[in-house]
Image: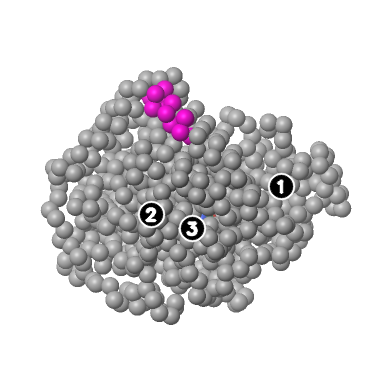
Amino acid sequence: MTTTSAVESEFFTAGDPIADTRAPQGPIKDRWDTHRFEEELVNPANRRKRSVIIVGTGLAGGAAAATLGEAGYQVKNFCYQDSPRRAHSIAAQGGINAAKNYRNDGDSIHRLFYDTVKGGDYRARESNVYRLAQVSVEIIDQCVAQGVPFAREYGGLLDNRSFGGVQVSRTFYARGQTGQQLLLGAYQALERQVQAGTVQVYSRHEMLDLVLIEGRARGVIVRDMITGEIQTHMADAVVLGTGGYGNVFFLSTNAMGSNVTATWRAHRKGAYFGNPCYTQIHPTCIPVAGEHQSKLTLMSESLRNDGRIWVPKEPGDERPPQDIPEGERDYYLERQYPAFGNLVPRDVASRAAKYVCDEGRGVGPKVDGVSRGVYLDFSDAIARLGRKAVEAKYDNLFDMYEQITGEDPYVQPMRIYPAVHYTMGGLWVDYDLQSTIPGLFVIGEANFSDHGANRLGASALMQGLADGYFVLPPTLSAYLAGAPFEEADAEHPEARAAAAEVTERVQRLLSINGERTVDSFHRELGHIMWEYCGMERTAEGLTKAIGLIRALREEFWRNVKVTGTNEELNQTLEKAGRVADFLELGELMCIDALHREESCGGHFRAESQTDDGEALRDDENFAYVAAWEFTGNEGKPVLHKEALEYEYVEMKQRSYK
Ligand SMILES: Cc1cc2nc3c(=O)[nH]c(=O)nc-3n(C[C@H](O)[C@H](O)[C@H](O)COP(=O)(O)OP(=O)(O)OC[C@H]3O[C@@H](n4cnc5c(N)ncnc54)[C@H](O)[C@@H]3O)c2cc1C
């Protein structure tokens, strides 16, 4: 096995430790209040003199733009979709967590905090997670006030359901369309500000670089995706709410356009990248049907409230599910994890599904000679609650499944298999959500966030809205209280240089005129990532992957074919830029995964497991956030470690048995 020092000398350099200097001290429940009290404020009359660029109109970016606009700042809000409300957040299905304890089932802020730290396998910051749990309560009030139609129970209170990794019901939902309804709420608030003149929305504009002036983030270079015009926009601060990078795997449940470009370009300009290898593989997705596919579909985790997961006991049993008697079925999650059953966290459920399929007990059509699917069966729930009650909770999800597979899940069990879904890694930020570049703030899935090595279900919406509505507004205001900064407009030499670089890169992509499509590179990268940096990782596989990615990247810049021109709507060109960035990110993800020789959460190193195959952490050597610094195209990345300390939660081997 490769040793840590051998990995270090070959692939990276060790740098100085990094600390979150903005993290407050004192009793955990007072930290956020105290911090806000100690921060400087900007008086309302001065706010209109300050400007902010927010890239992203999803739940994080949209909420931030609306809130900062309402506060009186001048906001420019960018997205690459044709409307802010088509951001990927709209796809979120199952729900959003909050510690309201409406069910009186023992929930509290402290329990949500505890569940999240444990669920993240003790690789998240205590202070951040506690704040998230506190703010969760305010999010629900805000969204209800906006008119978000959450489900209600018979007494009129908002209804709750359970998600993986917890034993209480704290997930608020709007059928299987929670993201859509929340985004419509944020969008309404945003449009109000557009009308009021505080926010200007630039849809169909893609950020291709960040502008730094005197070391501060002061602007962005964007391409108008309709005309190809390269534009420079300047402001006092820049916020990225640009979502996750799961599409580095090619196949994922993310929207087709989700990409890493904004955060990767900022990384190249000096923002450290936190824990890039932490990827979430979601256990309940519709299985891959074949090579032709370019997208995977999630079946919400909420389905695990009532659906039971099973496979045949015997390998190679190809009988239809209804012909397999109860005694010949293996409800393997209920058997292995009696305390949490089908609601174990995603990392645990995903690995268990992989193992039963590896044993030859998978179900459904064979792809490459193997059936990779397990049943998610609602027959018990339908018998117990009646079809109408199941329809009321999940109907749109059942419809979606039937439309995609042609099978009726009311009649035969769904088939599901794990797929890439979410990235816990992202740009490193301090307690104020500020990156290592002053004036560059990062929110939502784009930051390395509060979820540690594994995110619990329904916690991404909570974090995105916490960041956008509640955390960023005061912390960014405190930063802006230090303005005015140096005068800077689009003619500043740094801005002109950044714009020229973007133009040159676009031209370079168009001029290669090679023989392979952008998609073929992306698909090959995805294969490498899934095979070697997916659900199970080894030193040998990761080392091989780094070599393969380097070779693929070299070929990309020599042999990619980008058709069309810059001066038009050119999706091939857009994609080429994104894939070029994925080809760099993929290498860093593998280096991060290779250097972290422990298993934790979604990062499962085959060399580090317990006797019964669970992830085995190594707290002595790896209880830190890995913050990576870019050092140039030929240089090795530099690793800065932020030590993680636990005062309020005891670090233990995670158990859901
Ligand atoms: C199918 C599915 C279901 C999910 N269900 C749930 C759920 O039930 N509960 C839960 O908590 N989480 C869920 N998640 C996760 C959750 O939806 C996301 O983590 C969250 O919505 C991300 O929000 P965001 O605002 O950070 O980013 P996004 O919603 O991804 O928005 C990114 C924004 O950035 C813009 N952008 C990106 N790059 C650029 C660029 N270079 N230039 C200009 N604009 C750019 C985009 O246009 C977009 O406006 C789900 C995820 C998926 C895939």
Residue at 48% from the left image edge and 69% from the top image edge: 645
Q: Where 514 falls versus 577 (above or below)?
A: above
Report the mark closest to the observer, 1 or 2: 2
Residue 275 % position (x, y): 46, 53
Give, as a three-letter code, the residue at label 3.
Ala
Residue found 34% across the figure and 27% down from its top? 509
Q: Nearer the viewer, residue 38 or 406?
A: 38
Q: Looking at the image, can residue 297 be seen?
A: no
Q: How much space separates mark 1 and mark 2, taking CA atoms?
A: 38 Å
The amino acid sitting under disc 1 is: Tyr
Q: Residues within 10 Å of mark 1 (few under 14, many from 20)?
A: few
Badge 2 amino acid: Gly
What crowding class fits label 3: few (fewer than 14 Cα within 10 Å), some (14-19), or many (20 or more)?
many
Answer whether residue 370 is magenta in the image: no
Image position of 374 (left or right of 500): right
Residue that carries the numbered disc 3 in the rendered image: 460
Residue segment shown in magenta? 549-564
Circle on res. 355: 1
> Residue at (37%, 20%) from the top-left corner?
513
Determine the secondary structure under disc 1: helix
Q: Is mark 3 within 8 Å of ligand 1?
A: yes
Q: Residue at x 26, y 67 (%)?
A: 478
Kindly identify which numbered label has been placed on residue 238: none
Q: Is residue 589 left or right of residue 210?
A: right
